Amino acid sequence: MFTLPHVLNGLILAHKKIFFSLLFKAVSKTLLEFGRTRLKGTVGIIAVLHTWDQTLKDHFHLHCLIPAGALSVDQSRWIAARPNFLFPVKALSRVFRGKFLDLLEHACNQGKIPPPSQELKALRKKNWVVYAKKPFGSPHTVLDYLGRYTHRVALSNDRILNVQNGLVTLSYRDRKDGNRKKALPLDAHEFIRRFLLHVLPDGFMRVRHFGFLANRAKQHALPQCRKLLGLNPALPEIPNRSAHDLLLELTGVDLNRCPRCQKGTMIVVAELPSLSGSLRWDSS
């Protein structure tokens, strides 16, 4: 996980698209450079932008999922990383800091954003937060992690404990207190303000792929990786299942079950045609 310093939060909120793009670029350049210098090949990266912490405050960071190895430059070999180690976190932090601040300075010089002069000088001397988790134990664990992080929103419904008397009460985990679960009451206006902090710019892609997983490369590189790892180069076919079947498998919720009696089976009687154009009320 690569995190931007909170001192930049004000500028980021005023120029979201520019800063988020710089974050993706700095992180991908850092990881690809480490792949070339440490593993002598090209790594694959899935990067997911998150903008929140447990209490809905602005906390801008990038989650990255990286296979434990690299594809050699000539694509003839798979170069495996150490079983419990990919890259040194402190070195990643320093290189990430340098690349991001260089990109930021370039954007300032181009007039895209106002120059954060004092902050920029101070940020070059501070340690930036980069965190690495232990390797996943199985493909199922990887898919579970990926599914949760790529489709997670700032706040899920089950974390809203109560809405009453102008207050919205949220549940959250306090990282500074042993990850204990606590309740946070917020004034409705403050809740809305915090929630809207995490609205992304129109059309912005919060999940991106780099290295041998990049869209331009994966058509050839991914089958080659599978071949070198002794797997069938052809990707397995994904069964075409309906939304009903997927929801039933993942959550146990049967959309055809009557929501009132929980016994009867609902059937489709008719499908209403979609409405075209705008609706108008006849006041006569």
Image: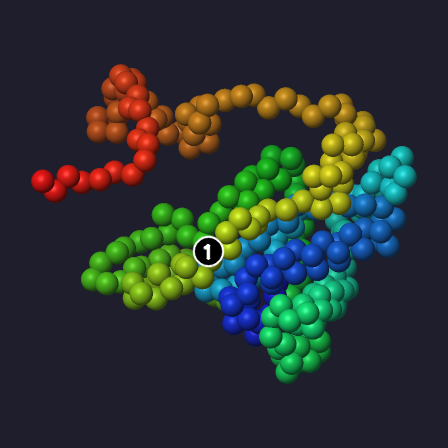
Left or right of 204 on screen, residue 158: left
Residue that appears at 67% across and 44% down: 209
Q: Which colour scheme is used?
A: rainbow
Q: Which amino acid does label 1 sit on?
A: Val
Where on the picture, by quarter, is residue 116? Answer: bottom right
| Residue at the extreme front | 284
Question: Percent position (x, y) of residue 83?
Answer: 77, 45
The correct choice, above or below, for 190 with respect to 181 in the image is below
The correct choice, above or below, for 272 with respect to 277 in the image is above
Question: Percent position (x, y) of residue 50?
Answer: 54, 55
Image quarter where the C terminus lies is top left
Residue that appears at 81% across and 55% down: 33
- Regarding residue 233, the answer to whether it shows in the image is yes
Disc 1 designates what residue? Answer: 199
Left or right of 44 on screen, residue 142: left
| Residue at the extreme left | 284
Residue that appears at 37% across and 29% down: 253
The correct choice, above or below, for 188 with respect to 276 in the image is below
Image quarter where the N terminus lies is bottom right
Pick the front one: 17 or 57: 17
- Regarding residue 9, the answer to whether it shows in the image is no
Residue that appears at 71% across and 42% down: 214
Total numbered labels placed on residues in the image? 1
Query: Secondary structure beneath disc 1?
Result: loop
Question: Percent position (x, y) of residue 183?
Answer: 35, 61
Q: How crowded is mark 1: few (under 14 residues within 10 Å), some or many (20 or more)?
A: few
Left or right of 198 on screen, residue 42: right
Question: Percent position (x, y) of residue 78?
Answer: 84, 38
The correct choice, above or below, for 218 with respect to 2 in the image is above
